[in-house]
Amino acid sequence: MKALSLISIRNKLVLIIFSVSMVVITVIGSVHFFLDIQHAKKAMRHDLTSLTELLGNRSSAALAFDIDDLATENLGSLLHINNVVQACVYKNTGDLFASYHRESDQVSSCPNSDLLPGVGSKFDSSQLVVVQEIFQKEMSLGKIYLASDLTPIKAVLWNIGLFSFLALIAASLISFILASWLQGFISKSILNITDVANSIIEKGDHSQRVAISGADEVAKLGGAFNDMLDALEKQNAQINRIEKMDALGQLTGGIAHDFNNMLGVIVGYSDLLAETLVDQPVMSKYVDEITHASERGAALTKKLLSFSKVNHQEVSDCNINTLLLNFHHMLSRTLTSRVEMTLHLEKELWPVWIDEGGLVDVILNFSINAMHAIEGNGRFDIQTLNTTVSHPAAASLGINQGDYVVLSFVDTGCGMDKGTLSHIFEPFYTTKGENGTGLGLSQAYGYMKQFDGVIKVESQPGEGSTFSLYFPRYSKKFECLLVTENQPVPSVQAGSGVILLVDDEVALLALNHELLEKNGYTVVSVDSAEKALDILAHQEVDLLISDIVMPKIDGYQLASIVNEKFPRVKIQLVSGCPDASRSALKDKTLSDNMLMKPIKLDTLLNRVDALLSSADELLDLEA
Amino acid sequence: MLRRNFNFTAMRLSACFLVVLGVMLAVSGTACASQENSIKAAYLYQITQFVEWPEPRPSPDAFHLCVFGVDQISNKLAPLHMREEEGGHIEVLFPTNLIDTLNCEIIYISKEKAQALSSILKALQNKPVVTVSSIKDFVKSGGMIGFTIINNTVRLEINHSAAIRAGIYLNAKLLEIASFVMNSQSGGKR
């Protein structure tokens, strides 16, 4: 069986068909052979019995009138019947009356009548013996004994054997030819699938498909194989797109981080400059322009960070229907009167766990895109729907199976071709020329990725577009984690305390050092976590303000070490590009209270003041 | 033509035949008169096995074996007289005139009737009576079955034509064993 498993399916099928055919032919041949032998024996028995009856009948008168010459003459007629070896006629008394022996045989005497077998016929190993009683009008006159060799049966055996041998050879050839031909009906389709599979393995060409013919199981297998290839191709495309978008996300995240650091320096020094140029209105105006440009740059980096999933947002359970109803009026105004907007909202829509503010931006982006896509008058429908996504739709979308809330934007705009569709989520890709930033859909893409959702796009040139946003159904109650960046800030007062500043961006480090020092704090600044730890070991520090992205030991690791070794030291993390490693941080409030670069001076001072005040309260309590 | 309805049981016939055959064997090869008569008596009995008479027979429940004229064979046949057999009995008769011979199925004409043979045969011509005799040239004279001695063995001569004319069927086997068979067309010899 092991050897059988090594040969090809084609040869296996030939072997199976050939073997089955040969077994069937052999069995039928054997049965036929056996029946022929039985038939030959029966025929021989019948012939010899008839001959015996004839001779007995002819010998009856000779027996009755005791004319042995006549009986011997009658038996002499057996001379022409080659297979009869011996014939004997006995009187009623048992005495031998007449006999015949074949000339070619050595003469042997007739058996004694007492030793004769019973009336009838009997085969032994070498001959057939028939004994009949001779009657004349119901009166027994004697017996006749005939013995024949088995030449007729041997002849049949030889003929059948020869015929069977020749038939077997012919049948083998026919069977082999038929098997070789018939196996193609099964193996052809299987080999077709194998060829396609080999081609995919060797060349990596997923575009090939199995040619389907017929409707049998193999054809269904081929169909399933093709379906699998289709799904695989879609998934590969999805993976490629995701990988590309992730790479873009990392790139834009990195750029945004560096850009934020630069903006931080610009914003910081602009603030300082503004304070010193209060009495110079013209110069103050220039500084305001610098500050304003910096803020626009900060807004841009925020969008970039949104695409790269590293935005810091306020998430909560949200009913999208409520959100849409709240913003309905605003959206209608945005779309202008030439675009008729309709809401189709699912009753009892499932809640989702998202950042509402971010979703408003996403909705606005899609609405503005739709408006731009619609030339003249048109329609823009927003739909919500509860749906359960199961396999293979989930695999096709690249999401897990489960319950989803689908938010769809359907416009009657100009639609998109395949080339456009493959790029729409890339940052800075736009079809609006100078009218678009190319960040709207990439921001939406990053937003959906952040909440384990996905965007499905269906569009044809001239037939409008449908964007379906799949949000996982929210089923757990999470405590809402708030970003304090935008929280209202109390008024800033001059502070006191020792602050340890850590940032590998030396310019930013110097800026913050100066800002804090100017506001009454004692500041020690270092450009690495190692140096910070060294300072902490030798000097009393009230507050540690650390950047996150640093070489060797990053801000999270530093915070963890400080938390453990110097629990009295307050910590504030700042970053232009926080990443997922924050999940490793024990104290979640550190990451949740992180300040995003560029940091406004007021924001920084308020946070420092708040942290040092709480430290003072703790000291008072301990005292 | 119907077959003779004289039905002996195989057992009894066998027993009877054995007796007769024993006698036959005892005298085989010898030409003494007693033995010859015994053989002829056995032959007479055997002949009945190979002959079929036309229906109706004179007496359906009896078979008449007759000896016409004085002959030693009578002594050999006498023991069979009135022997009951299944389906009838054997009657050994000795008719004294030709009228009575018409009741016989088979009649043995003694040698002493040789002078009157032609008239006897004429009387029985075309009658369903098998005529048997040891008279020389009996079949040539118009008799049906004649006994003759060849090489010290009793053999039969048969006038098949006479039997046919009388409506009597002689079995081919009987014709086969005959040393001489006379047919009307060929008058053939064997």
Image (spheres, grey):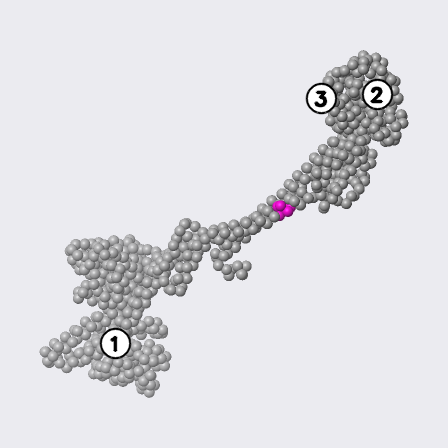
Crowding at label 2, few (<14), some or many (≥20) Cα neighbours within 10 Å? Answer: some
The residue lying toward the viewer, choosing from B153 and A445, is: B153
Q: Position of residue B33 (x, y in %)?
A: 89, 25
The residue lying toward the viewer, choosing from A60 and B33, is: B33
**Kind of element beneath mark 3:** loop
Amino acid type at mark 2: Ile
Q: Residue at x 79, y 33 (%)?
A: A69
Q: Main secondary structure of the magenta part?
A: helix
Amino acid type at mark 3: Gln
For marks 1 and 2, give the one nearer the viewer.
2
Q: Which residue is mark 3?
A: B185
Label pair 2/3, CB-CB below 8 angstroms:
no
**Kind of element beneath mark 2:** loop
Q: Residue at x 30, y 79 (%)?
A: A550
N-term mark: 2 or 3 = 2
Q: Residue at x 20, y 63 (%)?
A: A431
Q: Position of residue B12 (x, y in %)?
A: 81, 27
Report, in whole angstroms, how far the alpha carbon at label 1 lies from the one at label 2: 162 Å
Q: Is residue A5 magenta?
A: no
Occupied quadrant, residue B130: top right
Could you say which disc has been placed on residue A258 in the image?
1
Chain letter behind tag 3:
B
Chain letter behind tag 2:
B
Crowding at label 3, few (<14), some or many (≥20) Cα neighbours within 10 Å? Answer: few
